[in-house]
Amino acid sequence: DIQMTQSPSSLSASVGDRVTITCRASQGIRNDLCWYQHKPGKPPKRLIFAASSLQSGVPSRFSGSGSGTEFTLTISSLQPEDFATYYCLQHNNYPPTFGQGTKVEIK
Amino acid sequence: QVQLQESGPGLVKPSETLSVTCSVSGGLMTNYYWSWIRQPPGKGLEWIGYVYYSGSTNYNPSLRSRVTMSIDTSKNQFSLRLNSVTAADTAVYYCARAGIVGASDFWGQGSLVTVSS
């Protein structure tokens, strides 16, 4: 299985901060990567697909970049509703595998 | 917008079979991969497998010997069965839709299934 190493595992940030989360794949996955936001008691929400394509309805402050083995999710200006856990997922190689998650908390 | 809702037993005894059903509304099942993902308490997400609208399946090799998935497009439902469960199978079980295998776009709220005697 492809290992997805996500960092950091948690971070504290303030409203308005720029936040960057990184995912590294154990082997090249082209751009077959999604980012999800997960809040307690709610279904995970896809933010980004194909590494950098914004899901319809997702605010433009979210962006994704990368290809191959290194990927980044950036929140340009953190909003109160963005406090959640974020996961990356690779679907280039079977079975699909997730990163361990990054919990974004209020500073 | 498509919505998915899991329904599960809540509690299953060790060595028995866990069954969860996902009901789909607001969209067709055709041409999609209908997936199951789980998250044990305090742990990460694990992809279990999918059933295609045609009925073909593909499972995570780590669970393949114990998993069966099925679909009933006339009822807009698909199901997961996991046999010979242990405490390690205690998790929130999510169903999800994907146009590309693995790249799920819509998920259900999740159903907590606890394995305990």
Image (cartoon, coloured by chain):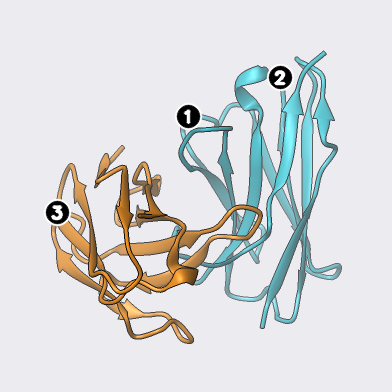
Does residue B74 sit above or below B102 in this rendering?
below
Which chain's residue wears label 3?
A: A
* Residue A101: percent from left, percent from top: 38, 47
Q: Quadrant of the C terminus of chain B?
A: top right
Q: Which colour is chain B painted?
A: cyan
The residue wearing badge 2 is: B84
Provide the secondary structure element on which disc 3 rests: loop
- Label 2: few (<14), some (14–19) or many (≥20) C-alpha neighbours in 10 Å: some
The residue positioned 65% from the left and 65% from the top of the image is B54
Of badges 1 and 3, nearer the viewer stands 3
Find numbered disc 1 in the image and state the secondary structure of the residue it sits on: loop
Query: Going 86% across and 67% down the picture, which residue do you hit?
Result: B75
User: Does A66 sit left or right of A62 as displayed?
Assistant: left
In the image, what residue type sits under mark 2? Ser
| Amino acid tagged 3 | Thr
Q: Residue at x 46, y 57 (%)?
A: A84
In the picture of the structure, the residue carrying the numbered disc 1 is: B62
Measuring 31% from the left and 37% from the top, which residue is drawn there?
A1
Pick the front one: B53 or B63: B63
Work out whether B26 lies above or below A24: below
Location of residue B3 with respect to B18 vertically, above or below: below
The residue that label 3 is drawn on is A69
Q: Are marks 1 and 2 on the same chain?
A: yes
Residue closest to the eye, B73 or A28: A28
The kind of residue on which mark 1 rests is: Ser
In the rendered structure, the colour chosen for chain A is orange
**Quadrant the N terminus of chain B occupies:** bottom right
How far apart marks 1 and 2 lie (CA) works out to 14 Å
Q: Between tags 2 and 3, which lies in front?
A: 3
Indicate the chain on which mark 1 is placed.
B
Disc 2 and disc 3: Cα gap in Å? 37 Å
